[in-house]
Image: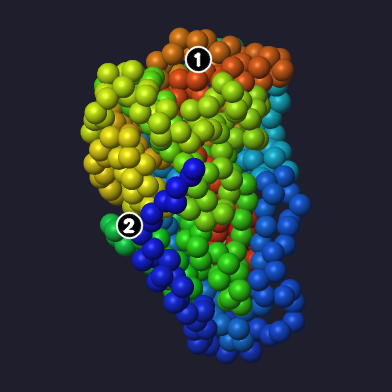
Amino acid sequence: MKRKLALVMAMLMVLGTLPACSSNSGGSPSEKGENAVSGGSAGTEVGAVIETGDKINSTYTNNTPDANLPVTAVEDTLTIALASEPPSLDIFQLSDSAATLVSKVHCEGLLRRNDATMEYEGVLAKSWENVDDTTIRFHLRDDVYFHNGEKMTAEDVLYMYQRGNELPLQSSFYNMYDLAKCKIIDDYTLDIVTFEPFPPMEDFMSDPADCVLSKKAIESSTPEALVRDLNGAGTGPYKFVEWIAGDRIVFERNENYWGEKPEFKNLVFRIITDSTARTLAFEAGDVDICMQPLTTSVDSLRRNPNCDIWTCDTFTTANIVFNCTVAPLDNKQVRQALAYALDLDTIVDTVFSGTGRKHDSFFTPQNEGYHPADPETDKALLEYNPEKAKELLAEAGYPDGFTIKLWTNENQNRIDLAEILQNNWGAIGVKVDVSIMEFATLMAEYSKGIHEVVICAFAPTGKDGQFYYPYMHSTGPFRRNYAGIRNPEIDKLMENAQSSLDKEERAADYAKVIDILREEVYMIPLHNSENIFGVRSTLTNFEPNPVSLPRLAIVKSK
């Protein structure tokens, strides 16, 4: 019989007593251009959930704000609450989801993926065509200037690929390019060549990490300095102003931007790592957009006239990841035992509060080759059986259990999950020492390969299976390959899928990889998340994104 899981309920009790979104007083809405909008009772019923009908299954509310509510918390400034502090402004050196989101306002790439249609659009590239199976010719815009005043040319684009291939973090994403054969045709035309046919090329080139930076700006700075200031290297709609550690990162509108200029003069990322505090700041009207509001607050936020909630499907999965290079986690029976000891259905319902869906793979349903787990062959990931867990531990040589270290970051869902793991694994004799770290610290530590168990998410920025390559291929560093997977069969399958032009063959390779991952229990997949964004109801033109990277520069007032 499944037993109930104990959770600390203090947060839920706090949320149950939260007031409704406050209506901050502001200037008169009667004067055009002043930072206020008119409210009223007309429009969509408060809290009504609307489906967009796009390919990422997004939903939103379209609430009518209170009368005289200012358009933004600070006049002519869009304020976004981040769930973690970025480790760097230079995402070629250090990156996570927060760093990538920040980079999107001041850096751009050749292409982007339209998340509503899943088609690809030019950004710094006007057009492109396949010259042959391994060559794409790009025709660049000729009206783009970097923030340092230098004009963008093909030399800067080629430099992006050269630098990406040299830096450890990004090399696994750039090592398919044959740099010796890539060539500049003229200032605004170049050929990008791969060693072999690479079917997901457009998906990779629309990755936010594919950002074109000024070669002159990068080479005239130092790696250490670029972490905090890109030295005017970006082309984006906003320019960097300052970074106050632990508090905020400030940008101002790029008045020389080649495209449509943002409506708001300033854009500020506020760093609010505590989930409750971040949600409260949004409810209070202190921030305009809230990344990852508490899932337990979503329903109440939807009923507030001054708040809108946007959701969409994601490519992200939450996982319990084992470092399979250290004892006793290098023993498959031990990993299976830890999986059998978990009541995953109840865990997912409890921790994720009904958002997203329970999942059985770190490949998502959008990925080629995905198929549901088999109830017969994948029992360890599907069945709650503590007695079976104890049997496996005894067979593995640990009848009295052992002690393991579990690391996670300050995300409240993950803290709650860590407590549940302590309880469930403790019931089979496994003691769990939990360490909660800032996200940047957590990344730095598990990049060393000294971790044992980590609660983390796989968040590829594209839908093609090759985005998972560095997470499971033997060459992937611990910074990507958290589980330390060293499996020749997986290597061979991923390498074949990387260059095969046969879509069915690629899907079959990915399906085999998924089966191996389940059999080996390198990780315990938990949840395919649903992205949730809180947006002030005075704002419009918000585009939800499956990898939590909305285009903030295009947000406008209603």
Counting other residues with Cα less than 10 Å from the Cα at mark 2, is it few (<14), some (14-19), or many (20 or more)?
some
Please, what is the three-letter code of the amino acid marked with disc 2?
Answer: Trp
Q: Residue at horizontal 73%, vertical 57%?
A: 51
- Report x, y in % for residue 314: 59, 44
Mark 2 residue element: strand
Which dot marks residue 331?
Answer: none
How many marks can you see? Answer: 2
- Report x, y in % for residue 84: 37, 53
Counting other residues with Cα less than 10 Å from the Cα at mark 1, is it few (<14), some (14-19), or many (20 or more)?
many
Q: Residue at horizontal 27%, vertical 23%?
A: 398
Please tell me whether residue 537 is drawn above or below residue 159 in the rendered image: below
Of tags 2 and 1, the one toward the viewer is 1
3D distance between C-alphas at marks 2 and 1: 42 Å
Specify whether 32 is left or right of 431: right
Please tell me whether residue 234 is drawn above or below residue 515 in the rendered image: below
Q: Residue at horizontal 58%, vertical 86%?
A: 68
Please, what is the three-letter code of the amino acid marked with disc 1?
Answer: Ile
Q: Earlier in the sequence, mark 2 or mark 1?
A: 2
Q: Report if residue 16 is visible in the image.
A: yes
Nearer to me, 259 or 150: 259
Please give the residue where the numbered disc 2 appears in the rendered image: 243
Nearer to me, 358 or 307: 358
Mark 1 residue element: helix
In the rendered image, which quarter is residue 371 located in? top right
- Report x, y in % for residue 522: 42, 25
Name, please, the residue furthest toward the front.
Answer: 1
Specify whether 1 is left or right of 129: left
Please give the residue where the numbered disc 1 appears in the rendered image: 490
Q: Residue at horizontal 27%, vertical 18%?
A: 397
Q: Report if residue 370 is visible in the image.
A: no
Please tell me whether residue 179 is drawn above or below residue 14 in the rendered image: above
Nearer to me, 320 or 27: 320
